[in-house]
Image: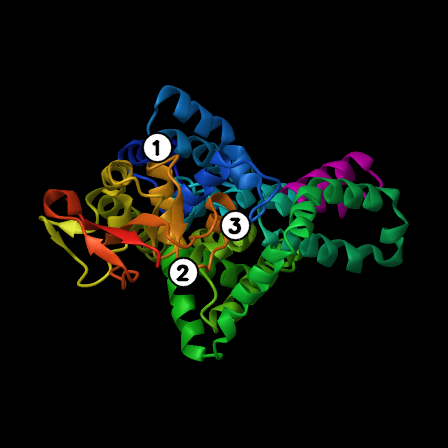
Amino acid sequence: MLKPKPYLLWLACAICLAGHIYLGFALGLSVDEAHYALYALHPALSYFDHPPLVGWVQMPFVWASNLWAAGDWLMRASPLALWGVTAWALWRFSVWALILFLLSPMHQLLGLALVPDTLLLPLTLWVMVLTWKLSFDISRKSYWLWLGVALGLAGLTKYTGVFLALGVAMVLLPQYGALLVKQSGVWLAALIAMVLIAPVLLWNAQHDWVSFAYQINHADGNTNAWQAKRVLAYGAVQLIAYGLLPLIGLLVYLLRLRKKHVELTRVCLAFGLPLLLVTLWLSSKGAALPHWTAGAWLALLPLSALGLQYLWSARKAAWVLICGLGAWQVLLIAAVGFFMLNGGQWQGQSLFKTHNPFADLHDWQAASVKARALQTEHHANALAVSNWTLASRLAWYARPAKVLALDGKNKQFELWFGALEYGQSFIWVDWSQMPLLRPVGCRKLDGEAGTYKGAHANFDFYLCTQP
């Protein structure tokens, strides 16, 4: 039987590591990266749209970056470390699980950019392992203690961390029933988790529970109607983002192997399926993003790995299918990295007729520095853009300038910088990749001062006064 060669696996890991490091040095921060770096720049118990751990993790790197005037590469240190820990944990389970992880475009991206889902990857595996151990020995206090820590950290990471607690309950409750609640370890774990998530609850209590209201409204898709085509489109995006191999391996496992590994099946499905199904349902209302299911696919990888291993050993014809799909995913990852570096361009021309999804990784640093200089020159009170996705880059690169997101949908910028007041002047920054109507009372600055022409986008600057 043909087996994956260990030296090829280590070579693949080395190539991935080198790619992450190279991209980390070469690219500017994405929307979410800059937003969570701002979390670290403004320490708090929690934030409008997410719990605080993603910002707390970045704090030492942000401080070091400011102290040494280092580039954005320091912001990539923590996601790379978390990605490495996740890869190591999967390797401890099986080589096939690690291979599937390395072949996942979305999991590769999460190793480059720190978002809450990056933190949830190793936490998901940690909770799964502890739950697995508790399914065999419910009396071990140390397991419960560490489970409380892991669940508390998940709650500090993202509100969907509640799905990890749900997974624990789905595994242990059917097995132990009423005996479970009689275990002192359960209450120890619950107490530890509640203590850890207390900052989130305290911050929300002080801010009229604004985060919970925002998350409920966001999950509702802003009352969008249910549409099946959105589910199909989101499903297609999932197959591109994580690859066909995990799905094929999972189907083979469920058809052929589920009765041989009953406990593993229960654990992986309990931690994978609920989040995956809920996110698919949310996608029907246009309220789901591709990376939201990263933890769910990770939880299912052990089953997918066993399924692919069985398929590989049982049918030689499967070698062509697995190698072909694996090669396709390698090419896709390489293509994404290439276009990230080149801003979505080929031979100097953009491949996208309208919005270029890769352009926002470039040009913001120089444009923000110019905007900050114009604010100082014209004695303006603030810089302003239309929404938070633009404000995050501008606020990071023009720090410590006051930056306003005028659409008011993400209240975090109001919490940081306050609202626009009567009579305030500001520099309005118009980005060519997202042209929007500028506020009333704005005039474009003359000559070269009014424009910055980047390699991938242009920025126009207006001096505005709030009437």
Q: Where is residue 330 in the image (x, y as percent from the top left)?
A: 30, 47
Q: What residue is shown at x 60% (from left), y 53% (from top)?
A: 159
Please name whichever residue, 345 or 467, is drawn nearer the observer in this view of the structure: 467
Amino acid type indicated by mark 2: Asp
Give the position of the N terminus as an image quadrant.
Answer: top left
Q: How far is disc 2 from disc 1 in space, using C-alphas? A: 27 Å
Amino acid type indicated by mark 3: Leu
Give the position of the C terminus as an image quadrant.
Answer: bottom left
Q: How far is disc 2 from disc 3 in space, using C-alphas? A: 36 Å
The circle on residue 72 is 1
> Which SS type dominates the magenta stretch?
helix
Q: Position of residue 137 (x, y in %)?
A: 80, 42
Q: Earlier in the sequence, mark 2 or mark 3?
A: 3
The circle on residue 298 is 3
Specify the farthest residue to the top: 68
The circle on residue 407 is 2
Foreground tag (2 vs 3)? 2
Marks 1 and 3: in contact by CB < 8 Å? no
Q: How far is disc 3 from disc 1 in space, using C-alphas? A: 28 Å
Amino acid type indicated by mark 1: Asp
Give yes or no for residue 111 being in the magenta stretch. no
State which region is magenta: 129-153
The local secondary structure at tag 2 comes to loop
